[in-house]
Image (cartoon, rainbow, N blue to C red):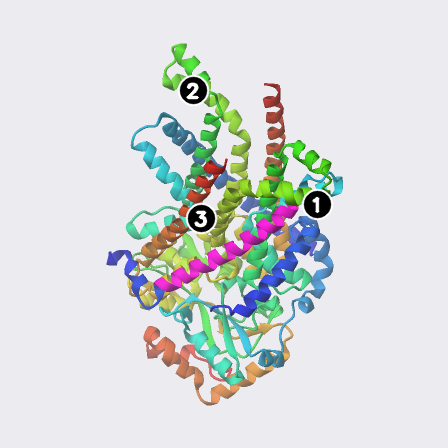
């Protein structure tokens, strides 16, 4: 969580030089004309320019940057001692162990996940990332490790059982950059969405009664209704059955292949069932174990 | 950069601009009112109220708008005070802006020589008349550059509204980037729309300030 | 108080983490302020030089800073530069860059103002004594402007600290993000934690910024 001193110093030195160069070309980094002119030729080059680190480079550096949620209990969150924890994090820890490197966790928001990979700011995204066609054009997904669909949770007092019941003035809470947002925008363009950046914000707003329902991954809404009294998942499954998988920067084949092998190997030892029992059992009970967990990518 | 994408996103940014302006102006109007009332209270040294205004200024000038909004929007409902996102935006902007407007008006009022107040009093005007006919008209015109600077500052601050689910310009950009990852186009439009919104005000501000300087010179 | 969720802060290292988060914000602002003052002095001097091209460039720079919200600049630098130029800046470096970019403009403008307020006769006297331009600035003008600038730059520190609340948006785990994490981790046992935790964050910001801005006001009055 804390950056080490060395990286801070190098960061500073970088900033110093940048600031000076920024000044000599005063205002260049932010003026609109500049963005416009450099934008065009940069588009094709962006994947190269952004860059990613190959498996060997990661091993050599001794640290891997993994993007996880820091406010999405029980999948990725920070416990009261400041340690990252949850289903995704458990898997991340294993990756670090098998690669023999330290892990630098990067706290992401849903809407930033593609961005973080494309700009090479993280090596792997392990933030409950649902595999979709649109996203697969932007990043490379490894084998999946969890099943997911969309779900809608609402207060017991006014359970939403069908999206057709949503009134013209009612708002549904979604998190920006999630599959729920894309699905509702595409299939129910008339429903008003109330969008938040972070899980913590969305949940607090939902508890505060700012929307009639909250649409998200069904894993997440089921967890919410089980953990908090007074809420029911009126629509347990919406849209397609999808999967959740780790993602790497597009074209990073060495890392992708390693991840796929890792997931297959872990399948042999029923690793993800163990992860479920360690992290999700408290929330979901044993009933959901087989529906949620995907072992060995199948 | 892809022209089709720019054209496709344009209406979304336009809506966002209107929302930003709508909440922005309501908030600024509220800030203006708070500024007038607050500076009048300080001017007349109204007991008790004077201290309240003082505390209010210190609190809102020394905390970030984002934290103020989080508190109003996410925390207050826990103790039973429920506000919609839009009103929260207006209220947050108004309260923050008010603290700055009071200071701006006050420096405007202080710029007017005491002799004018005394002359007005000797002409038989009461305190309120002095304020309304003598001090305020001058104070407001002296404060115009400061007020315009505040307006730009407050409209810029609207960029944090995205965190309380208001679809302002910043949010639209972030949201579209999150969904379709067309970063360059989204950021380009974002910059263009902020320019459309704020450049005219900034230019007016510069012109007014120059005029005022000539005005003072001719005095 | 239990129902208001302040108790969550005493669990584990929660409160300590909140303070660490606050320190992240303060650190970023302090580094940026120091850089802004140094670069601002240069930019301020440049602004007083009569050169049309230089003048136009600086004008665009100042106007950009005046108009663009810091959050927009943060996004452009953090995500945009990697896309366009392939620079991989960490979130902290981007934040410091943006705050310095902004602070330098503000400081530059203040420096220009205070240089202009120094009577022309001082320049002329220095020249008459045989000093060259650089010596004049270094020994005569800058020492005088610095004193006027100190209260103003202290003010800039509080504004920077307040603006650091935005860096959460580019993934820096600072005080607000820690607050959200605490609320999230304790949602089950303490559903009202949002009130207590956000209240404390609000107060923390105030406790940090208020004394600094009082100091600035005090110095401004004393040295005016």
Q: Which residues are magenta?
A: C15-44
Dot 3: chain letter = B
Question: Callout 1: 10 Å neighbours few (<14), some, many (20+)?
Answer: few
Quarter holding residue A84: bottom left
Characterize the magenta stretch by its predominant secondary structure. Answer: helix
Secondary structure state at the residue bearing disc 3: loop
Q: What residue is disc 1 on?
A: C134
Tag 1–tag 3 contact (CB < 8 Å): no
Marks 2, 1 in one chain: no
Q: CA distance from mark 3 to mark 2?
A: 34 Å
Q: What residue is disc 3 on?
A: B64
Q: Give the mark nearest the N terminus, 3 or 2.
A: 3
Rendered position, B179 above or below B168: below
Secondary structure state at the residue bearing disc 1: helix
As for residue C29 lying within the magenta part, the answer is yes
Point out the frontmost of discs 2 and 1.
1
Position in image of residue C74 (x %, y %): 57, 55
As for residue B118 lying within the magenta part, the answer is no
Q: What residue is disc 2 on?
A: B132
Rendered position, A167 above or below A42: above
């Amino acid at each position: 969580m804390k950056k080490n001193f060395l990286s801070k110093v190098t960061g500073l030195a970088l900033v110093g030089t940048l600031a000076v160069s920024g000044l000599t070309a005063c205002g260049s980094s932010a003026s609109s004309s500049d963005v416009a002119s450099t934008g065009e030729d940069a588009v094709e080059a962006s994947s190269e320019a952004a860059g990613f680190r190959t498996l060997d480079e990661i091993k050599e550096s001794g640290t891997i940057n993994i993007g996880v949620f820091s406010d999405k209990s029980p999948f990725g969150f920070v416990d009261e001692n400041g340690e990252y924890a949850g289903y995704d994090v458990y898997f991340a820890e294993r990756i670090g162990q098998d690669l023999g490197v330290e892990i630098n966790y990067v706290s992401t928001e849903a809407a930033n996940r593609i961005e973080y990979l494309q700009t090479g700011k993280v090596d792997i995204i392990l933030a409950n990332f649902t595999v979709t066609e649109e996203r697969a054009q932007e990043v490379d997904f490894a084998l999946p490790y969890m099943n997911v669909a969309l779900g809608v949770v609402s207060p017991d007092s006014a359970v939403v059982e069908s999206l057709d019941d949503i009134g013209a003035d009612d708002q549904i809470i979604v998190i920006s950059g999630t599959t729920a947002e894309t699905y509702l925008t595409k299939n129910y363009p008339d429903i008003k969405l109330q969008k938040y950046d972070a899980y913590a914000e969305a949940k607090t707003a939902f508890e505060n009664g700012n929307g009639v329902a909250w649409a998200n991954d069904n894993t997440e809404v089921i967890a919410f209704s089980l953990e908090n009294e007074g809420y029911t998942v009126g629509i347990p499954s919406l849209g397609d059955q999808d999967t959740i998988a780790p993602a790497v920067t597009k074209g990073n084949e060495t890392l992708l292949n390693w991840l796929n092998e890792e997931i297959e190997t872990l399948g042999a030892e029923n690793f993800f069932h163990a992860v479920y029992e360690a992290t999700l059992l408290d929330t979901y009970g044993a009933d959901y174990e087989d529906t949620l967990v995907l072992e060995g990518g199948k | 950069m892809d022209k089709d994408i720019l054209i496709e996103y344009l209406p979304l940014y336009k809506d966002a601009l209107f929302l930003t302006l709508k909440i922005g102006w309501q908030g600024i109007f509220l800030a203006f009112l708070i500024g007038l009332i607050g500076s009048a209270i300080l001017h007349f040294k109204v007991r008790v109220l004077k201290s309240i205004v003082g505390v209010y200024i210190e609190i809102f000038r020394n905390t970030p708008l984002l934290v103020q909004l989080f508190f109003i929007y996410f925390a207050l409902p826990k103790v039973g005070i429920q506000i919609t996102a839009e009103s929260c935006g207006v209220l947050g902007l108004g309260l923050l802006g008010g603290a700055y407007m009071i200071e701006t008006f006050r420096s405007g009022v202080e710029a007017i020589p005491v002799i004018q107040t005394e002359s007005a009093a000797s002409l038989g005007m009461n305190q309120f008349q002095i304020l309304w006919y003598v001090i305020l008209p001058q104070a407001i015109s002296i404060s115009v550059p400061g007020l315009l600077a505040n307006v730009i500052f407050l409209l810029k601050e609207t960029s944090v509204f995205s965190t309380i689910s208001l679809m302002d310009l910043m949010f639209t950009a972030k949201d579209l980037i999150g969904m379709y990852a067309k970063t360059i186009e989204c950021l380009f439009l974002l910059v263009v729309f902020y320019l459309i919104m704020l450049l005219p005000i900034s230019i007016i501000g510069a012109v007014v300030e120059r005029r005022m300087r000539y005005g003072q010179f001719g005095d | 108080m239990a129902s208001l969720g302040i108790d969550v802060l005493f669990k584990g290292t929660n409160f300590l983490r909140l303070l660490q988060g606050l320190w992240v914000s303060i650190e970023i602002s302090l580094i940026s302020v120091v850089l802004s003052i140094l670069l601002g002095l240069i930019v301020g001097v440049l602004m007083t030089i009569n050169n049309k091209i230089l003048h136009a460039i600086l004008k665009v720079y100042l106007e950009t800073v005046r108009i663009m919200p810091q959050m927009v600049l943060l996004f452009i630098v953090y995500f945009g530069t990697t896309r366009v130029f392939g620079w991989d800046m960490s979130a902290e470096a981007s934040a410091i860059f943006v705050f310095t970019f902004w602070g330098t403009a503000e400081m530059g403008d203040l420096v220009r103002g205070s240089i202009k307020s120094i009577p022309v006769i001082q320049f002329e006297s220095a020249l008459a004594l045989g000093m060259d331009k650089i010596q004049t600035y270094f020994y005569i003008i800058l020492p005088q402007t610095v004193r006027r600038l100190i209260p103003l730059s202290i003010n800039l520190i509080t504004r920077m600290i307040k603006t650091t609340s935005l860096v959460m948006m580019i993934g820096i785990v600072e005080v607000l993000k820690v607050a959200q994490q605490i609320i999230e981790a304790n949602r089950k046992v303490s559903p009202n934690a949002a009130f207590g935790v956000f209240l404390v964050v609000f107060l923390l910001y105030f406790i940090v910024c208020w004394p600094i801005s009082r100091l600035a006001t005090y110095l401004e009055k004393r040295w005016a």
